[in-house]
Amino acid sequence: MLPEELCAALKEMGEPPFRAKQVFKWLSVPVRSFDEMTNLPKTLREKLEERFFLTAPIVERKQVSALDGTVKYLWRLYDGNHVESVVMRYEHGNTVCVSSEVGCPMGCAFCASTIGGKVRNLAASEILDQVLWAQADSGLKLSNIVLMGIGEPLDNFDNVVRFLKLVNEPDGMNIGMRHISLSTCGIVEKIDKLAALGLQLTLSVSLHAPDNETRSKIMPVNRAWDVDTLLAACRRYFDRTGRRISFEYAMIRDVNDTPYHARLLADKLAGTGSHVNLIPLNEVPESRLRPSTPEAMRSFIATLEKRNINVTVRRKLGPDIEASCGQLRREREELR
């Protein structure tokens, strides 16, 4: 609940406004039960227990990379479902990658998260819990968030926006919007809806191919909103918010990494000031897709740089723990 909602609920229960502030601060500690809120009267704790419930997840499995300290969590939710989040260490601060849905409906061919489809949306509290409990368990101060785990954030639009408001609250985690990145595979109507809110977060668009033929093969969403329609929405987003868009591009051998694709991508993004983040493909056992060769990667980068396209290659963190989201949940579901 947002502070003003909590205040209204407690007022209805006959409690003064300062109690709402106390409860909200406890929820950001975080706690697993109302009994832990020790500065509240026992009678109030009992009333809260009767009326509300906490969604605190349980660590089902935790992996820590021996190579770079990346921490991967498999969380068990209150209803027995599972999601993943990953804590990554960078020079500029620690980042947590969180999930927004249990499973994913988008069906991208290269992604482990979508295997088995979507089960349900996560509540705003369940998204926030991943940040709160990852920070508490890891002992690392988290200063950056990426909504790039299991699920399509814009498919769970209302809960994701509520989460953004909650994590931004000064009396809560107080993480600024400019420290948050939201990744979408390209639900155009929701990109426009997000732009209308004027939030100063970073929008990352999973493009993965510059042409409709290739993109439709690996990303079913392209059949609803093709490349040009998506890029037009991205331009509208930039015009409305002033925030540069980052395009995610998984390099897939002999699928989207040819000189043709590099040239066309440069053509499509020329003059936009956009940033391209090339991602060495994470192999998924159920998929026949394989990562690009180092030679293809170098050639692709050279083509983009020659056209003055801002390009980086994502550093692969936690390779010894399969730190890309979806792997642990898939393994856990196979055991059920």
Image (spheres, helix red, strand yellow):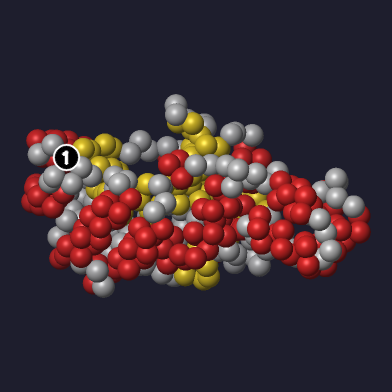
* Three-letter amino acid code at the position of disc 1: Ile
Residue 162 placement (x, y as % from top left): 54, 59
Apparent side of residue 61 relative to residue 330 in the rendered image (left or right): right
Left or right of residue 148, residue 246 in this image:
left
- On screen, residue 269 above or below 316: below
How far across and down, in percent of the image, does residue 69 sit? 52, 32
Front in this rendered view, residue 200 or 310: 200
Q: Nearer the viewer, residue 196 or 60?
A: 196
Relative to 158, residue 67 above or below = above
328 sits to left or right of 1: left
Seen at 39% across and 54% down, the residue is 198
Please indicate, yes or no, whether residue 109 appears anywhere in the rendered image: no
Q: Is residue 199 left or right of residue 307?
A: right
Q: Secondary structure at mark 1?
A: loop
Quadrant of the image containing the C terminus:
bottom right
Q: Give the residue at x 44% y 29%.
A: 92
Q: 43 and 280: which one is in front? A: 43
User: What residue lies at 27% left-to-right and 51% top-to-bottom?
Assistant: 238
Determine the residue positioned at 40% across, 47% down: 200
Residue tagged 1: 309
Q: Residue 87, position in %: x, y?
A: 52, 40
- Please tell me how many numbered marks the rendered image carries: 1
Q: Position of residue 201 (x, y in %)?
A: 41, 47
Q: Residues within 10 Å of mark 1 (few under 14, many from 20)?
A: many
Classify the position of the N terminus by image quarter: bottom right
Q: Is residue 244 visible?
A: yes
